[in-house]
Image: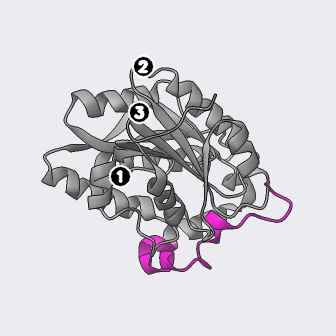
Amino acid sequence: MKEIFTSKNIYYSIIVPAYNEEEYIEDTLDSIFQAMKEITGQKGEVIVVDNNSTDKTAELALSKGARLIFEKENQISRARNKGVEIANGEVLFFVDADTKVHRRLLHFALERIKFENVGGGGSVLIFDSDQNNYFFGKLVPNFWVWISRKFKLAAGSFIFCKSELFKLAGSFPENLFAGEEILFSLNYKKICKNYGQEFVILDKYPVVTSSRKLVWFSSIQILVFMIVPIIFPFVLRWKSFCSFWYKRPSNRK
């Protein structure tokens, strides 16, 4: 018999935005459900937001036991915010659909929130492969990890926060098609500070995220997508520029 999800018996919600992720969604959900087994005394739920997929993403998510909600506007911010609309948890986790979560990470994050003065944060990450590209496969991810720790900025692959503070922070900005996790981190850190809580980047159990873009795009293309927004951040308001995050090369999953 299926358990009925209510706000009374759910402490944390894990939201997974997914657009055409049939290649990765099963492994991602398997890692999440395995991590949930490490948590005792607190019930959780997994919500997959089908962001207008045309493949078997939704079907596979349901087969794994996730709740499913649909968001027709293909935008990562809207997908994450849509998941929050039906989330019952006091604590929210956001995990990208191509990211595997260490079995101890959820438990570790919840412990920090419960027993320490922590309002939320993120996790360091590693690629599943460097794709024989030392610069973008190793140096750049390591540099991001340094930035993430130094400036307390969460990568979109794994973010956790309190639902009450999430709303005060204004949710994920829907005027951006990329980089929304950076602006959210900045806004959420301010809210945490106002309430005397800390925003942390966990480094004990890194998440493992897909390196597929290193295969899909050339080094020059990747460099352009990295540098241009730094110089002209307003381009992240245009979906046409953000194809690096939304469009996939033909014949590639």
Specify the amino acid type for callout 3.
Answer: Asn
- Mark 2 lies on a secondary structure that is loop
Look at mark 1 in the image and give the residue it sits on: 153
Nearer mark to the viewer, of 2 and 1: 2
Front residue of 160 and 139? 160
First-in-chain label (3 vs 1)? 3
| Distance CA(mark 2)–CA(mark 1) | 29 Å
| Magenta residues (range) | 228-253
Q: At 69% from the left edge and 36% from the top edge, which residue is drawn? A: 64
Which quarter of the figure is the C terminus placed in? bottom right
Front residue of 177 and 41? 41
How crowded pointer 1 is (Cα within 10 Å; few <14, some 14-19, many 20+) is rated as many
| Distance CA(mark 2)–CA(mark 3) | 13 Å
Nearer mark to the viewer, of 2 and 3: 3
Specify the amino acid type for callout 1.
Answer: Leu
Q: At 79% from the left edge and 56% from the top edge, which residue is drawn? A: 55
Look at mark 3 in the image and give the residue it sits on: 9
